[in-house]
Amino acid sequence: MSRFWSPSIQSLVPYTPGEQPQVEGLIKLNTNENPYPPAPAVRDVLDQFDTSRLRLYPDPESALLKQSLAHTHGLNTNQVFIGNGSDEVLALTFMALLRQDKPLLLPETTYSFYNVYIDLYGIEARHIELTDDFRIDLSQYQQPNGGIIFANPNAPTGISVPLSEIRALLESNTDSVVVVDEAYVDFGAESATALIDQYPNLLVTQTFSKSRSLAGLRIGCAFGHADLIEALERVKNSFNSYPLDMLAQAVAVASLEDENYFRSRLDQVIATREWTNQQLQTLGFEVLPSHTNFVFASHPNVSGAELMAYLRENKILVRHFTKPRIENHLRITIGTDDEMQTLINYLQQHPKL
Ligand SMILES: *Cc1c(COP(=O)(O)O)cnc(C)c1O
């Protein structure tokens, strides 16, 4: 702390991302990165990139990428927003749309970054408990609010809500913005982008970090009514006109063009997830039904902290949260088949399993 800091920064508690240690031979299952490389076309873009172009500023609108995303989702370009990772898109969304007089509604257990933005912007929030089986019950969100945000599938549980329940919420909640964070939607959930033309208060955020194997380039986006997108553009252009660099824009377009590669890698991650789920259950774990590239699991005999430490000693990193209700769970990213086999092997050797 320093007397030179702005007063509100003194009490700020920032988000803590999963660690990125540089350890030889580490199996990294802690930040939901994709184990496979991005589409081959991405390499071609980088190989052929004319570096003399880098002296110029990038397109501030990311117009080609907007067109490509609009085409992919059957939307107009004025219904698409692009940002430097969906974390930035969310930061701008909280500022542009969710600072209202009435409280923001969100799940008690969800992506913990939302609470950082809530504190940063001084937003009043009401946290709603998950059900006993860790689901988001959207009928509980039918109460006065200044906005609603949740992740679908939710993090770190991995459980998704069906589109019909999101539609029912939007039918009754017409006076505030509903933000659906679809960071993991490609791994098996139903996307709410299909509802955008019907509900002017729906904003959907997505990312290239997980399903498109591009976490290193920081590419995120939002889809919604042109009026919502305009609010995001205003705030974006009040912070940073060029959130996406030239390479990221070109690479993102190339990644969207290779649909076959995208689908085949998704299928692989999903198959490995189901195998891992089965193996963990055989070892006595309780595993929540996941529509993501991770599983959320707990064991009745061994605490989450103990399991995490044990795996860490064996050079496997997983994520553990010290939060009531989920402190005995581990969030395990789906890696390659070999990596998951190694994880299961070590767990089988644990004296209490
Ligand atoms: C990973 C993640 C994000 C952030 O993704 P980036 O685009 O890499 O910033 C947003 N929301 C959820 C729920 C996530 O898990």
Image: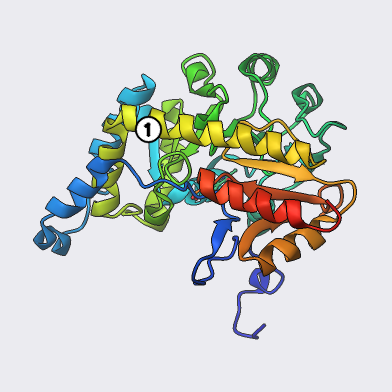
Residue 257 position (above or below residue 309): above
User: Residue, x 59% and y 36% (percent of image)?
Assistant: 273
Q: Is residue 109 visible?
A: no
Q: Between residue 63 and residue 328, name the one nearer to us.
A: 328
Tag 1: amino acid: Phe
Q: Is residue 40 left or right of residue 199?
A: left
- Provide residue 30's location: percent of width, then percent of height: 60, 55
Quarter holding residue 11: bottom right
Left/right of residue 318 with respect to residue 353 in the rendered view: left
Label 1, residues with CA under 10 Å away: few <14, some 14-19, many ≥20: some
Q: Is 93 above or below relative to 1?
A: above
- Residue 242 lies left or right of residue 54; in this view the side is right
| Quadrant of the rendered image containing residue 254 | top left
Looking at the image, which is closer to me, 326 or 349? 349
- List x then y, in percent, for residue 347: 73, 53
Name the residue rendered at 37%, 32% in the picture.
Answer: 262
Can the viewer see residue 197 in this picture? Answer: yes
Residue depicted at x 39% and y 38%: 81
- Disc 1: which residue: 262
165 and 293: which is toward the camera = 293
Percent position of residue 92, x then y: 50, 48
In the rendered image, the quadrant that contains the N terminus is bottom right
- Tell me which corner region of the image, top left, top right, bottom left or bottom right, holds residue 291: top right
